[in-house]
Image: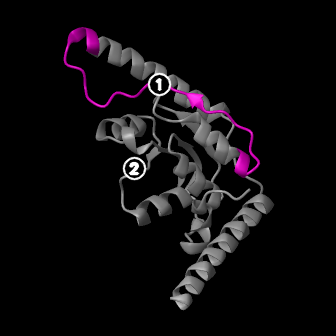
Amino acid sequence: MASDPGLLISKLRPQSSDKKHKLSFMPHVNIDSPRYRDFIHSLGWHYISPSDEESVVLADIAATEKLITSAMHGAILADAYRTPWLPISTSPEILNFKWQDWFSSVDITAELDVMPPIWPEPPSTLAAKAKDKLKAKVVRHKLEQLAQRGAFQLSKESTLEQKQAQIAAEIEKAKHLLLSREVCK
């Protein structure tokens, strides 16, 4: 079984292995927001926005000692750059079966830690503000707990190399097939 082609990123776009960030958080693109960025910064963590330029995202992931992420491709890129990662779910839109499929492709047994859904906009009513404050406290506590005791993941080096070789071989087969079809025209 092959894996996600994103595992090739460390071969295609090598990055410095200097670790500048002790802990980073990368959300799924659907919850990426300035409000959430500010919340993560209040924890003293580095925030990686999936909406940033590709070069910034790749450099930040490679420069991180540990990554907490609800973005599956954040975990895939982190694995390729050998940055231990911890998967979380921050929304019902995050599909566990997709994560489980990828986990199995790199011989990892893991579960998504489920977080309360993240709030996109500040609340306007007094009751909503109180609920928002309580929710922030719960999310803060859970994230801090995960950072301290979470089961950070990293595929085995040999598994990563094998998967990268399989993916590269599949790409070469596809190129060959396309070229042979062009020649036959």
Q: Residues within 10 Å of mark 2 (few under 14, many from 20)?
A: many
Q: Is residue 142 magenta?
A: no
Residue at label 2? 49
Q: What residue is at 66 percent from the left and 76 percent from the top?
A: 173
> Is label 1 in a helix, a strand or a loop?
helix
- Between marks 1 and 2, how big is the CA–CA gap? 19 Å
Using residue 105 as the reference point, say whether residue 39 is left or right of it. Answer: left
Picture disc at residue 7:
none
The image shows residue 31 at horizontal and vertical percentages of: 38, 38
The residue segment tinted magenta is 104-128
Snapshot quadrant of residue 2:
bottom right
Residue 129 visible: yes
The image shows residue 163 at horizontal and vertical percentages of: 72, 62
Residue at label 1? 139
Using residue 184 as the reference point, say whether residue 139 is left or right of it. Answer: left
Dot 1 or dot 2: first in sequence order is 2
The image shows residue 162 at horizontal and vertical percentages of: 77, 65
Q: Does residue 175 sit above or below 79 in this rendering?
A: below
Q: Please state which amino acid type lies under the numbered disc 2.
A: Ser
